[in-house]
Amino acid sequence: MLDAVVVGAGPNGLTAAVELARRGFSVAVFEARDTVGGGARTEELTLPGFRHDPCSAAHPLGINSPAFRALPLERYGLEWLHPELPMAHPFTDGSAAVLSRSVAETAASFGPRDAGAYRRLVEPFLPKWDTLVRDFMSLPRTALPRDPVTLARFGLAGLPPSTWLTSRFRDERAKTLFAGLVGHVMAPLSGFATGAIGLVFALAAHARGWPVARGGSQSISDALAAYLKDLGGEIHTDYEVKRLDDLPPARAYVFDTSPTALAKIAGFGDYYANYRYGAGVFKVDYALDGPVPWTAKEARTAGTVQIGADSTEIATALRAASRENRAPDKPFMITVQPSIVDPTRAPAGKQVFWAYGHVPSGWTGDLTDALERQLERFAPGFRDRVLARATAGPPELAARNANYVGGDIGSGAVTGLQILLRPKLSLSPYGTPHPAVFICSSATPPGPGVHGMSGHNAAKAVWRRLRQS
């Protein structure tokens, strides 16, 4: 009998398996797709030689993850590549605000009226970032806070809505960039704890940047899988699990799946019936005949570029997709251009480009034209660079990854108390009604992102049970 079986070979499932195998437990992973990866894959979606990331592309939380940093992933081929600027947010006048590794450079891009306010916001947390991120990403109750005072100060700043936090800024540049940071998790700007979301992304950039992985996001998953195999773990692909009886006998079962999928497989009925999924995304992967022709020079060297004319336009787009059940006319966009630092991703002189906007859950329309109209506002002539495109709306995203219910790449709405307490209001979110069944997906704390911390935290709950039995 195995000690643990993990269902789903995304970053969280693989991390949970690695953590258990490192502690001497026998582990096997079962994945429905033909390769490992989940939300961290790389494929030729458009033309031969153009390697795209179907979901995650830039990894501020990955490089800052306490779980990943404790593993020898570089030994297994993971290499972080840093663009000159982690992120830029261009404006229609050709200027841009930036999120730089340097706090001073970032603050200066906001203008003199807000530079001091931004420094006062982030600088107190940076010297204690490693402890803060470990405490923040280990909540709730998987470890005692190492620095409860700093964590409490962070909570005071971050638990109110982001609109409250950005009220300290006087001009639109800082407000817009910060609104875009919150938009990465598709949360309305007025929601509970959205200030913490924006603050975490900003601090992550200042601490270690927003890198891409050489060769694509698949290299993160491949490194985890290779390490797991060296630890004696097994990985089985092309293995769809429809019920617990499909799996070999084990002392514990760990699911890197959506809560509703787990309930169906394990026979939990309506146990997760109140779990809410969020808005979907419409994503386009581009093969380009050269760099994106950004008007703002800062955007040409940034790995990630946010697109939204101002904070009001961003708020309107997020509200349309998440609350008004309509596709926005001017979508807020997140774009990533890996080729500016990774020449392995496209043929010489060409580029891959990744872009998405938010749409209602399950939306079946085509947002391509609206996305490209937005891009043309900030990069005139963009369409002339397009060699090929691969589009994916909510139905296609859900078909690629069953965890993306309705096209929700965050595996659950990041709103209300569900921001912090997911998938249930519980101090033991990784447990389920069955004492031997656990959940470790992005539907558990600390939530979305390729960081492995949900798997790491769930593994702690699993090994506590295994030691007791």
Image (cartoon, rainbow, N blue to C red):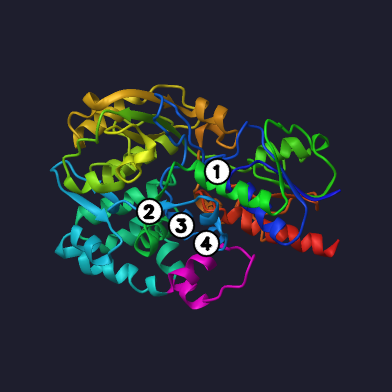
Residue indicated by mark 4: 69
Q: Evaluate if marks 4 and 3 touch, with contact meaning CB atoms under 8 Å apart.
A: no
List x then y, in percent, for residue 253.
76, 47
How far is disc 4 from disc 3 in space, using C-alphas?
A: 7 Å
Q: Nearer the viewer, mark 2 or mark 1?
A: 2
Q: Residue furthest left?
A: 93
Q: Residue at x 58, y 63 (%)?
A: 139
Q: Which mark is residue 63?
A: 3
Marks 2 and 4: which is nearer the front?
4
Q: Residue at x 75, y 31 (%)?
A: 242
**339 relative position to 149: left or right:** left
Mark 4 Cα within 10 Å, few/some/many (few <14, many 20+)?
Answer: few
Cα distance in 3D space between marks 1 and 4: 26 Å
Q: Residues within 10 Å of mark 2 (few under 14, many from 20)?
A: many
Residue type beneath disc 4 = Arg
Q: Are marks 2 and 4 in contact (CB under 8 Å)?
A: no
Q: Which residues are magenta?
A: 128-153
Residue 17 image offset from top left, x and y in percent? 68, 51
Q: Position of residue 331 (x, y in %)?
A: 32, 35
Which residue bears the numbered disc 2?
210
In front of the other: 332 or 248 = 248
Predominant secondary structure, magenta span: helix
Residue 412 numbered tag: 1
Secondary structure at numbered mark 4: helix
Residue density around tag 1, few if under 14, some if 14–19, many if 20 or more, within 10 Å: many
Per the model, the C-alpha gap separating discs 2 and 3 is: 8 Å
Q: Amino acid at mark 3?
A: Ile
Residue 142 appears left or right of 211: right
Where residue 166 sits, quadrant-wise, is: bottom left
